[in-house]
Image (cartoon, coloured by chain):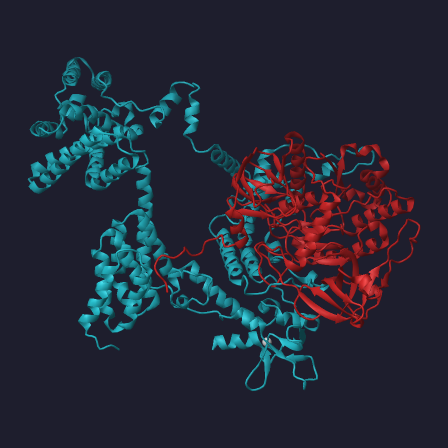
Chain colours: A red, B cyan
Amino acid sequence: MSVGNIEQAGSISTDYHMEDALNNNNEHLITIPREHELKFQLLPDQQLIIEIVYGIAEIFGTELANNIKYIFNNQDIFSIYAVDKTQLKWYTKESAVEPMITQSPNSAYAEYKIKIYNLHFALDKMRFTSSQGPNVLVIGGKNTGKTTLCKTLVSYAIKVKNFTPLYVNLNPTDGIFTPPGCLSATTIYDILDVTAPNWGQSATTGVTTIPSTQPIIKNFGLEYIHTNYSLYNTILSQLSIVTNSKIMKDPLLRRSGCIIDTPSLLDKSDMGANEKEHVNKIISQIIKLYNVNVIVILKEEKDDEDNSNNYEEIIKQQLTSSLSSIKDSISLLTLPIVKKSNVVEIDDVYKRFLQRVAIRDYFYGNSLNTVLSPYTVSSSFNKLTVWEPVVYNNDTDEDKNEEPKLEPVTVNASNLQHAIVAITFAERNADPDTVLSSSIMGFGLINEVNDTRKKLRILIPVPGQMPDKALILTQYRYLE
Amino acid sequence: MTNKSENVVLKEFSSMLDELTFNSGPIIASLAKFSEEHIEYSQQIVELVEKKITKSVPKQKLYAIYVLDSICKNVGSPYTIYFSRNLAKLFKSTYLIVDNKTRQSLINTFKTWVIPPNTGGTNDPTSNTYPLFDQDVLKNIENFLIRASALHERQIKMVTPKPTIPLLLKEIDRLIMICNNIVNITANNGSATQVEKTNAKIILLQELRQELLKRELPQEALKQVQDQLTQNFVKEQKYSLQLQQQQQQQQKLVNISPPSSQLQQFPLSQANKNILFSNSSIPINNGANINAPAVINNTSDEFSNNGIFGMSQNPLFPSTNTTANNNISSTIPNASKATDTINISRTSPEEFIHQLQENKINNLQKLYNSLKENDLLYIPGKESIVGLCNNYLSSNSIDSIDLIKNLPPLELLNNLVQDSISIKLDLNAFINSSNFQLNNWTINNTNIDTNISIKNDNNYVQFLYRYKPCKCSMCGKRYVTKSTELNEHLDWHFRINKKLKNNRNKVLQSRNWYLNDDEWIHTPNSNNNDTDAIVFNDNSVSNGGMNEYNNHANVNHRLFDKNLTGNLSIHGLAQENPNPFSFTRINDTAAAAATSSNSDNNNNNNSRKRSFDHNTNIRDNDFITPLHNVNNKKHRPDKIQDINLMFEVIPDSSNSMEIECYMCKDVIQGIYNEDEGQWVWPNCIKTDDGNYCHATCYYEIQQNQ
Ligand SMILES: [Zn+2]
Ligand SMILES: [Zn+2]
């Protein structure tokens, strides 16, 4: 029975989590001076809520709405950059521990930021004035902020006009829109989810507060590129075939260009000549296959000491040798970075965290406003065909001319327990080459393997039957 | 229905109504129930409730409105029809005499008449009868409320000064003055009752004044006094405003005439004297001393119009003249004399006018000084606009901190400045500028300068953010114009939030399978027509045909923006249905598609999908423009979650795991249901004639019938 006075209809704050968090708030107010950056580093299991009071603030290129609560989940690291003087409120659920907040020194950071702006304007200018937009290769060592730069550049690209840049992720250890272990390409046509370490959601059956994306995925499956360079080379060229077909079909995509994120290829400490040769080949391969016309090298100032570990040297050398025919069409830029101020320092713990987030997110959503229900199916061993990439353990194992191979995997607990498997589009009985060149339909998480009953249970994202497809075992494991 | 006589029934109802002296849910509920049981007397009951609303003391009116509300929500027609007749009048008159808190309650109640209270609840039995009343009536009330709240805001602004005793005293004195004026005028017109009334008010004011002087009053009491003054002297306030306007007009008319003659023009002076002297209870001295400052204070708002001397020409000035204050009186003749010294015969007309003006200024200056000497002039404080202005004009003194204190926040001002700078920059300027050329950085065999130059052009940085000035308040995305695109975008947010809210715990959501190569390549991410419409004028740029380009570009610019709008709506659609390019992979995922909760997303049965979306759209519109959709009472199936959990166990007789939905002809793939320990067809139902079909298809058809 309705008795008069009733709550006001249509209020915005309906999120239960959010109400939770607001109940025991301990609000802090911070003012960030213009062109300064504030870095937040969350502790495990910490939830942080941020609200911009006034000003223009962005997180890696995506502008934040004012007076809206943004919720960040545990252990995340991110920075808020104040385009204009910005005031923000923040609070955590746990009043005892505060997140680490550091303000970057202005001068060095501002200079770096200006360069990014200039780079962006140059790229946008290409988009406006030519039907072939910039295909930007972002390359550099570990922790030089490659992914952050890519994120910023794609975010800026959609700002002034609705360009739709293609984000190509060639770093299999980063799961951007996807679980880790794969190479992927995603058209960016809307703002990114600033609270998601993996940039946002890929398509779901329902609705998401930030429009979801539609990545194309090729599985690499290994953790380290150096454990199978030729496999990596093959996968990246297969991805380029698909992206190039799409770019050819879509003039706006062509005009918008692509931003290519890469792994740090030179990080391995004891690289042999053979391995260096592989890296050179991979770099020139990427440049050729993705029609790269802008190369941005992120480098630490002190990098110069060791020429052998220098991306700039490798690229210059490639441009004068294997790439000499196209070198005139390529702009080469270096972007010196300022360590500890403008780069999110990623240690292995944080990297693992991000990978876990990406996997959990794939199956379960982000638990805030996109809650997904995956589905466990049982299957008997004989109904599954599982392949796995060959792993070469040292430089000389791998014959350069040898084709990368997939090996069949015996289905049993020791091989598959807690493993992430890629479900390919290739039929179950397809030959390994077909399996290798196939795109990925989705991922499964193998939960229980019963060797005696010859049965296992797989978590798959979509309710229904286990697709009758060939599977590729990845090196990623996930314990729920 | 009942054998009780009409009289008895209505008596019972009105005695229940009389009990409603507090906000009692049970009483309201039983009243609603009673009126349902005695629907045959609905007309009389409506009259009783209406009477209750009109006759109750203001505090209790709200409860009677709640009775109305409850009856209409729970019983509905014919009560809604009968109440509609007087609703607007009742609501408005109630609103006008209740306090602010009650007003808010009234507004809240009104909102529920337009929009169902539980927007999410599909099992709310009332949600299909909204809006509750005739839409014209609601529109009428809505318009009234909009105006009322605007008025209210203005009133609040006007009353903002914190009530202090001196301030209130001034206010009272001012009102006494005005009342006196009114008495004068009405006395001449011969309206005796009016004079009486106003005189009574004057006495009241004087008593109030005494009270205020006698003892310290708490802040709340002062506030009350202030409210009382504003409420009970509405007429007088209006009158004073009128006076001021007249004053200004007169001032214009008599621009050249000497101040003394201007003073004569006040009709009040003479009459005023009479009143003041005849009414012995007025403490003359006191009143006079405070009168002048109060009114001068009042007119100082018009400072900009009148100039500094204009302040002395306020309606109260004559009254100071009549207060038998010798100091003042003596200054006036002096001032008047000054005008006589102008020798008309010896001067040209121009000179004469000039002299006249000068004299006038002199006279006013003298007047001003003497007023000041006698403490009869209100000098605006440092914090006032006048004070600030003087400060600012007179010097660049460091007092400017005070000045800054009273300006809008620096951030806001800065934002405005940046916005206005960015408006000047346009896209063409950016495209045509010689900056940001990548080829400056192109590799050169020998000498490589690959460092990105530092060109800190903050205007361009601002341009990146402010090119689109309208920022979405929900997600921060920016738009060029406020009107169309942003509204569509906000509508989209609204729909999505609503869906999210509705779907929570009701509809299972899961990740889609990724697209395969072909699907991905052919999936448009945005409206491809866009590209055609963006007439990127490559040639003219490289040709350096700047002028021509600019002309074209302006047109293109607009074209582009228009297209953005088009794209957006498509974009918006895509959001509702995140997989708009529904490629159904029947072979591998039909089962998945069938079980997936929002099967309309995954299924390529377009007609079905459309009809689903159609429904939602109607509902959405209901909320956005509630007043225009009275007849759209479409309903979604209540139990989406139940439908999705439906399945049919695959009979042993079936030799296939697959079956065709006899409605949409899609394949339903059998899956293993762990809870049942059986193989089942998910989202499936067996019809009476032994056919199998999707549960969703089945209920969809049912709904449409
Ligand atoms: Zn928005
Ligand atoms: Zn069907």
**Residue B502 vertical placement versus B184 (above, below):** below
State left or right for residue B454 relative to residue B293: right
Residue positioned 87% across, 43% down in the render: A321
Q: Position of residue B177 (x, y in %)?
A: 17, 31
Q: Position of residue B685 (x, y in %)?
A: 58, 79
Residue positioned 40% across, 22% down in the render: B392
Q: Quadrant of residue B245?
A: top left
**Residue A456 vertical placement versus B469 (above, below):** below
Q: Nearer the viewer, residue B229 or B4?
A: B4
**Residue B680 vertical placement versus A390 (above, below):** below
Q: Tell me the quarter of the image containing the N terminus of chain B.
A: bottom left
State left or right for residue B87 relative to residue A292: left
Q: Is residue B476 visible?
A: no
Q: Is residue B194 visible?
A: yes
Residue positioned 84% across, 66% down in the render: A410
Q: Position of residue A87 (x, y in %)?
A: 53, 37
Q: Nearer the viewer, residue B38 or B270?
A: B38
Q: Position of residue B350 (x, y in %)?
A: 23, 19
Q: Quadrant of residue B5?
A: bottom left
For the image, the number of numbered tags is: 0
